[in-house]
Amino acid sequence: MKRVIAILTAIAVVAVAGWFLTSGNSSTELSGTPLGSANAQETGADSDIDISDVQEMTLGNPDAPVTMIEYASYTCPHCGAFHTGPFKQLKADYIDTGKINFVYREVYFDGPGVWASLMARCAGPEKFFGITDLLYAGQSTWANAGGRDPVAIAAELKKIGRLAGLDGDTVEACMQDEEQAKKMVEWFQANATEHGIEGTPSFVINGETYSNMAYSELKTVLDEAGAE
């Protein structure tokens, strides 16, 4: 498992650092820590990684007049605060009532963010949002395990997977899937470039990108977009 952790960390560091350098976006507003330039490589349009089969994770009404995309990182404290707070109100007011189509897209600042994403997607869309809730609720524990030791973090993530009803072998296989990790990082880069994502959480509402905001402001934007 230690070798796999090293591989996935390298994937995240190289690919994400490359995106920060080539995207033209400022990293000063990012709530996570942008990865250094020493491992940068060519990414984006020059990549031959096929991301066409990456599944969108959605909630709500797919035919709603408003589509809201959230870009978030499992290791971002601001994203954790949003999901353990305002997101619950958003779900009650707009998602469960069918007023919006909600799409969640992962952003990666680091290896642990990639591993958490692999684990969350392990059982498909049926359990994705339940696992996401567990990840954000326990973020301060698993993301800082062992003084942010990668092995300790991986162990804590596997505990969350088992708590969500995944067997140990399934979680292990998902978290060791190097090809899927490469695909997810490439997918993140393409999405973030398309929508000009400069920090997390960010929201794209009917094609327009917004930075993090108070729930009252978010509600106004959604209502004005037609979600009333």
Image (cartoon, rainbow, N blue to C red):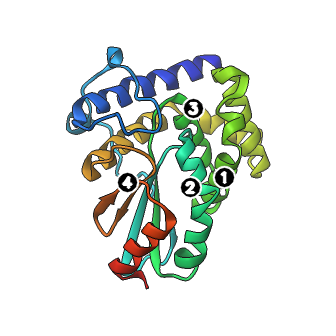
Gap in angstroms between the C-alphas marked 2 and 3: 19 Å
The residue carrying pointer 2 sits among few (fewer than 14), some (14 to 19) or many (20 or more) residues within 10 Å by Cα, namely some
Please name the residue that numbered disc 3 is placed on: 112
Discs 4, 2 touching: Cβ within 8 Å: no
Residue type beneath disc 3: Pro
Residue type beneath disc 1: Ile
| Residue 140 falls in image quadrant | top right
Badge 3 marks a residue whose secondary structure is helix
Which comes sooner in the sequence, label 2 or label 1?
2
Q: In percent of the image, x 20 and y 34: which residue is there?
A: 46
Which comes sooner in the sequence, label 1 or label 3?
3
Which one is in front in this view, the residue at disc 2 or the one at disc 3?
2
Q: Please tell me the numbered disc located at residue 211.
A: 4
Q: Position of residue 41 (x, y in %)?
A: 28, 22
The residue carrying pointer 3 sits among few (fewer than 14), some (14 to 19) or many (20 or more) residues within 10 Å by Cα, namely many
Q: In percent of the image, x 34 and y 34: which residue is there?
A: 27
Q: Please tell me the numbered disc located at residue 82.
A: 2
Which comes sooner in the sequence, label 4 or label 2?
2
Q: Please tell me the numbered disc located at residue 131.
A: 1
